[in-house]
Image: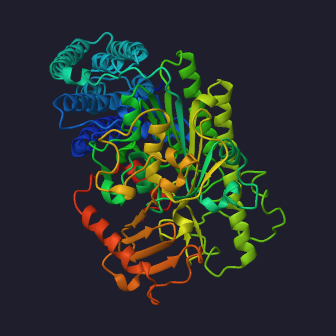
């Protein structure tokens, strides 16, 4: 399009661009492989820096390519199993290649333009170097083994995504077509294609031999093929509303009308009035809810550890009993990296959790997207002929700070406020502090209540989906929370700071007309870890040997609460003891607690001088410390707490976990990591 003299001046930046593009492609390949190598022990494909550049762009448009990938990407692989190890290595390398090929594909139109603008000539050595050495090398590396996607996708098809094969074939054909178009009449086309073919055959040989090894080792997997469910098995919906403190739920006595949907569930079923979480933050509390292990036993008491794969989750027990299992969660602490996806056929810890990350300090809410995800899954379940009963775990996030409910929930509980304080940036907002103006604090709390009402509304929509499918009455619905939130009752805000009741008491309601008596209220104290055995009992399954705590004994151990719902025989049941554990990197010491129906002892481990003892009957706000007056239960509670820690101090079932950069950024955006 212009004379040679003019072109030579513009050639340099053009070449620099092409070289940079090549370097980027090759670097991406190497970075993927390197990251994959150093994080092999994490054993999750998602922990690769897979498609990170592509994702960065697409997320601006609210598209999430990771959601399109098969579930296997989110599942941990058991690296002690040669079959799983083999699959993981092959898939990891395959995905790395795929990521690089995609990057190269995106750059391709630019290469076309450059090839048109800067045709290779004999005169210019720099151009010749580029076209004869650098670019072919870039093509070979960047488009490394395009057809390798075929065996790779064939492997993925085994996990139920045969449609991907078509896309893989189309991608491969397109890639080869582009290569031929670029080098159409040139001799080196043949050399490039031959090189690709040789590499192709080599990779395919590796993949095929890997699958052969897999096939040899695999039979023991077939032994755990899923059995059919009992024909009478009901469905289960377990909902955890993050940060919902018990005393802000209307049916628990809170005057504002925050929870009409939960209230209706309680009226139709059973409400447990005193439910104790073992920790005041998301990660250990949810692990206890889903494994029936106390934090001292599952051992995940900080950001940096996950449970071992040998820990059995409620979803695994239900899957083994024929349930189809799906989890939809909204925060990074529910990430599969901590073990949460065990036992789930489908576990989405990304689609909504990503929205949380993007919107952690804005007005965007997660409940609508969560309801859509769960609703779509239910539609598919119905469309597929309801082959198995479902277990759905739903983790709802919007009650968690920041407190920014959308209209009309923002003014619903405090329509007359005209001050300047709001619920944004709650943890770091210096306007929200101990001793702040009571009117302003009341407004912040009204915003928290608005989030509760908003979330309750979406809970109602999820239940409406079940009703629409005609399965609500054959579904055990359980609604609870992981912990509460503090509004300076003891000088602090938020959670994960203390073990007072505002932090650890949560609601628990169960609705299941065939077995749960309507309108029952259980006053005696129960624990979050009792939820699992209760669900299993209500759907007609026993608690298997490998599920739940093996160290807690007697009334300390996880209980089937269905016995407590039967009003006829409460006197025969033992009072349940609740232990608490809070161990944070920035806390001065591990705080422990023991709570009975009558008293609570909070004591930093190995620091009995700072113990606090409260009489919960006369002092439910926990303000009058009775340790100095030597109240009688002190020694007994202290002995019981010490005995528990002597039993639980070794053999935690946790291991270190390496968090991806993506995951760390999510936690940081929520104010959890420095
Ligand atoms: Zn939480």
* Residue 185 position by quadrant: top left
Residue 400: percent from the left, percent from the top? 58, 56
Name the residue nearer the viewer: 606 or 94.
606
Residue 434's image quarter?
bottom right
Q: Nearer the viewer, residue 133 or 61?
A: 61
Figure check: 633 above or below 186: below
Give how far across and how far down residue 195 sits, in percent: 19, 18
Q: Is residue 556 left or right of residue 368?
A: left
173 in relation to 257, above or below: above
Name the image quarter holding the C terminus: bottom left
Residue 666 x, y percent position in the rendering: 46, 52
Residue 330 in sight:
yes
Residue nearest the observer in this picture, 118 or 494? 494
Q: Is residue 167 above or below residue 63?
A: above
Q: Is residue 124 in sight in this rendering?
A: no
| Colour option used | rainbow
Left or right: 663, with 213 as reference point: right
Instruction: Give x and y (percent) for residue 615.
Output: 53, 77
Compared with residue 431, is residue 163 higher up or lower down, i.e. above or below? above
Query: As drawn, which residue projects farthest toward the top?
Result: 185
Q: Nearer the viewer, residue 155 or 187?
A: 155
The mark total stands at: 0
Outermost bottom residue: 629
Residue farthest along the right direction in this orientation: 416
Q: Residue at x 25, y 63 (%)?
A: 647
Tell me which residue sits at (20%, 24%) in the image.
220
């Amino acid at each position: 399009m212009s004379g040679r003299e003019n072109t030579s001046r513009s050639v340099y930046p053009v070449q620099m661009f092409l070289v940079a593009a090549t370097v980027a492609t090759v670097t991406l390949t190497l970075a993927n492989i390197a990251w994959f190598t150093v994080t092999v022990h994490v054993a999750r494909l998602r922990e690769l820096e897979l498609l990170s550049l592509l994702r960065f762009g697409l997320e601006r448009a609210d598209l999430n390519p990771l959601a399109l990938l098969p579930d296997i990407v989110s599942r941990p692989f058991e690296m002690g199993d040669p079959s799983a190890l083999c699959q993981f290595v092959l898939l990891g390398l395959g995905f790395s290649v795929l990521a690089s090929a995609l990057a190269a594909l995106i750059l391709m139109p630019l290469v076309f333009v450059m090839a048109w603008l800067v045709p290779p000539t004999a005169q210019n050595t720099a151009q010749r170097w580029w076209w004869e050495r650098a670019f072919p090398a870039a093509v070979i590396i960047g488009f490394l083994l395009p057809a390798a996607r075929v065996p790779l996708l064939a492997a993925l098809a085994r996990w139920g995504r045969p449609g991907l094969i078509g896309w893989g074939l189309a991608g491969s054909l397109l890639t080869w077509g582009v290569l031929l178009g670029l080098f159409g009449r040139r001799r080196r086309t043949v050399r490039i294609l031959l090189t690709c073919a040789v590499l192709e055959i080599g990779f395919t040989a590796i993949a095929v031999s890997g699958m052969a090894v897999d096939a040899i080792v695999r039979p023991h997997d077939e032994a755990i093929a899923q059995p059919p469910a009992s024909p009478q098995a009901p469905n289960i919906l377990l909902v955890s509303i993050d940060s919902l403190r018990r005393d802000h739920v209307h049916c628990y006595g809170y005057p504002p009308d925050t929870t009409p949907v939960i209230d209706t569930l309680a009226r139709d079923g059973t409400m447990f009035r005193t439910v104790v979480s073992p920790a005041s933050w998301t990660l250990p509390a949810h692990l206890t809810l889903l494994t029936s292990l106390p934090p001292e036993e599952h051992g995940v008491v900080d950001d940096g550890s996950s449970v071992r794969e040998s820990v059995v989750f409620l979803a695994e027990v239900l899957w083994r009993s024929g349930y189809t299992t799906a989890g939809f969660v909204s925060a990074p602490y529910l990430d599969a990296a901590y073990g949460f996806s065990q036992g789930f056929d489908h576990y989405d810890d990304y689609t909504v959790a990503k929205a949380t990350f993007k919107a952690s300090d804005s007005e965007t809410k997660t409940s609508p997207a969560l309801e859509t995800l769960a609703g779509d899954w239910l539609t598919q379940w119905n469309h597929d002929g309801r082959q198995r009963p479902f277990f759905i775990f739903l983790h709802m996030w919007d009650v968690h700070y920041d407190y920014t409910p959308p209209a009309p929930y923002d003014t619903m509980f405090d329509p007359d406020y005209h001050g300047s304080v709001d619920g944004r940036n709650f943890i770091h907002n210096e306007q929200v502090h101990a001793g702040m103006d009571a009117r302003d604090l009341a407004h912040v709390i009204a915003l928290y209540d608005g989030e509760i009402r908003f979330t309750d509304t979406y809970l109602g929509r999820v239940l409406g989906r079940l009703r629409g499918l005609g399965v609500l009455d054959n579904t055990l619905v359980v609604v609870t929370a992981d912990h509460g939130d503090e509004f300076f009752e003891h000088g602090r805000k938020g959670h994960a700071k203390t073990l007072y009741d505002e932090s650890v008491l949560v609601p628990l309601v169960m609705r299941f007309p065939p077995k749960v008596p309507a309108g029952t209220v259980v006053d005696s104290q129960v624990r979050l870890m009792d939820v699992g055995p209760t669900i299993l009992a209500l759907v007609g399954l026993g608690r298997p040997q490998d599920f739940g705590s093996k160290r807690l004994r007697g009334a300390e151990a996880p209980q089937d609460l269905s016995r407590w719902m039967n009003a006829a025989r409460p006197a025969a049941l033992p009072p349940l003891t609740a232990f608490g554990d809070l161990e944070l990197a920035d806390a001065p010491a591990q705080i422990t607690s023991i709570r009975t129906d009558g008293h609570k002892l909070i004591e930093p481990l190995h620091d009995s001088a700072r113990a606090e003892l409260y009489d919960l009957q006369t002092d439910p706000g926990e303000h009058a410390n009775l340790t100095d007056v030597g109240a009688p239960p002190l020694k007994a509670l202290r002995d019981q707490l010490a005995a528990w820690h002597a039993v639980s101090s070794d053999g935690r079932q946790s291991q270190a976990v390496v968090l991806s950069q993506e995951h760390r950024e999510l936690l940081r955006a929520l104010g959890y990591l420095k």
